[in-house]
């Protein structure tokens, strides 16, 4: 087990160290063929448009390789950027910049993809006035990049579900099967408040997943304050909301897309969690180019 909950600054350092170890190994063999001169490099967006994210990972990758590398940002995290826009200017050793180039761009393209996808969902629901609804991520993140991608979700305008198994309780299908179903759960604890007291957890951090209206009725009878409605139809989402009377926080999840997100939000649920924010990524394309005396920035 681990005995420390990692903070974002810790994650940035670990991410960079791991990624550079993976890419550099014992050293950059290609760098033997070039002179170690001072250069200027420009980073531009090649994709059509995006929400920028990952500047801390990008910049600190270069600093980890060579503290003398200078990075001047033209854009910051959270800004919408467009094709061929200048993102930043680098100045430093050619060998150092080449050593950090791929890793730094990998962070930028991945985290910008997460932020951009989240932003796309937020744009789809911004005109839905009926009820404020949070757009959440899940634990379906790239291995090792949990905190990084959850940061990117926030940059894109979304919110975070639990950060890990240590963060809060979510009794899902396999938990309930292992317990012997809802009946056994109720028999064992009586109600959600009692379960939270026995297991020494915060009742507000205790969520139960249900897959149909029958399970929903059992979860409400149990007194769950947070209920995850997994793969519910629009009709059943509306029914659950109407029966809820604001007793519990209702979260829709499962097969959420840009095509149906508006309809789901309009049912009146409090939250929608979307695994696709962090796992179904279309990388945002950036380019880094050395600028020679004769070249001109496009």
Image (cartoon, grey):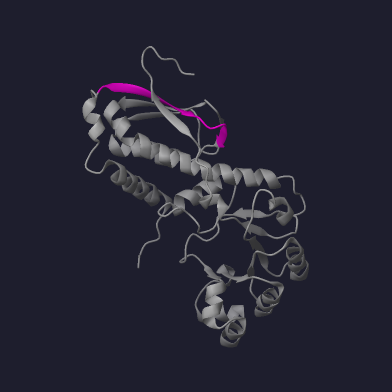
Residue 222 image offset from top left, x and y in percent: 65, 79
| Magenta stretch secondary structure, dominant | strand
Return the residue found at the far top. 294
Instruction: Say whether residue 39 is magenta.
Output: yes
Q: Residue at x 48, y 35 (%)?
A: 285
Residue 37 image offset from top left, x and y in percent: 26, 22
Name the quarter where the N terminus is drawn: bottom left
Q: Please tell me whether residue 76 is drawn above or below residue 294 in the rendered image.
A: below
Q: Residue at x 51, y 73 (%)?
A: 201
Residue 288 image offset from top left, x and y in percent: 41, 28
Q: Residue at x 50, y 48 (%)?
A: 151
Q: Residue at x 55, y 59 (%)?
A: 161
Residue 198 vs residue 218, the one in the foreground: 218
Residue 73 visible, this angle: yes
Q: 66 left or right of 229?
A: left
Q: 27 left or right of 175?
A: left
Q: Please tell me whether residue 247 is drawn above or below residue 8 in the rendered image.
A: below
Q: Please tell me whether residue 178 is drawn above or below residue 92 in the rendered image.
A: below
Residue 79 visible, this angle: no
Instruction: Say whether residue 99 is magenta.
Output: no
Magenta extent: 37-50
Residue 257 image offset from top left, x and y in percent: 64, 51
């Amino acid at each position: 087990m681990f005995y420390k909950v990692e903070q974002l600054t810790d994650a940035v350092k670990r991410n960079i160290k791991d990624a550079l170890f993976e890419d550099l190994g014992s050293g950059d063999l290609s760098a033997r063929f070039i002179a170690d001169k001072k250069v200027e490099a420009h980073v531009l967006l090649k994709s059509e448009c995006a929400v920028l994210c990952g500047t801390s990972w990008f910049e600190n990758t270069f600093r980890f390789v060579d503290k003398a590398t200078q990075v001047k940002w033209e854009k910051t995290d959270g800004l919408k950027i467009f094709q061929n826009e200048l993102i930043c200017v680098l100045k430093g050793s050619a060998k150092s910049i080449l050593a950090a180039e791929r890793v730094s761009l990998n962070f930028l393209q991945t985290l910008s993809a997460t932020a951009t996808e989240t932003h796309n969902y937020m744009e789809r629901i911004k005109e839905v006035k009926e009820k404020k609804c949070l757009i959440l991520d899940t634990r379906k993140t790239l291995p090792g990049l949990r905190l990084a991608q959850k940061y990117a979700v926030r940059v894109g305008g979304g919110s975070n579900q639990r950060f890990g198994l240590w963060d809060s309780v979510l009794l899902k299908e396999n938990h309930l099967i292992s317990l012997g179903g809802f009946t056994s759960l109720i028999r064992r604890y009586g109600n959600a408040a009692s379960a939270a007291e026995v297991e020494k957890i915060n009742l507000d951090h205790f969520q139960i997943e249900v897959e149909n209206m029958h399970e929903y009725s059992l979860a409400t009878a149990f007194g769950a304050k947070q209920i995850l409605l997994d793969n519910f139809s629009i009709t059943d989402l509306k029914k659950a909301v109407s029966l809820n009377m604001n007793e519990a926080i209702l979260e829709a999840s499962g097969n959420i897309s840009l095509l149906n997100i508006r309809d789901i939000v309009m049912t009146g649920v409090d939250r929608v969690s979307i695994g696709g924010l962090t796992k179904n990524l279309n990388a945002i394309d950036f380019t880094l180019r050395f600028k020679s005396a004769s070249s001109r920035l496009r």
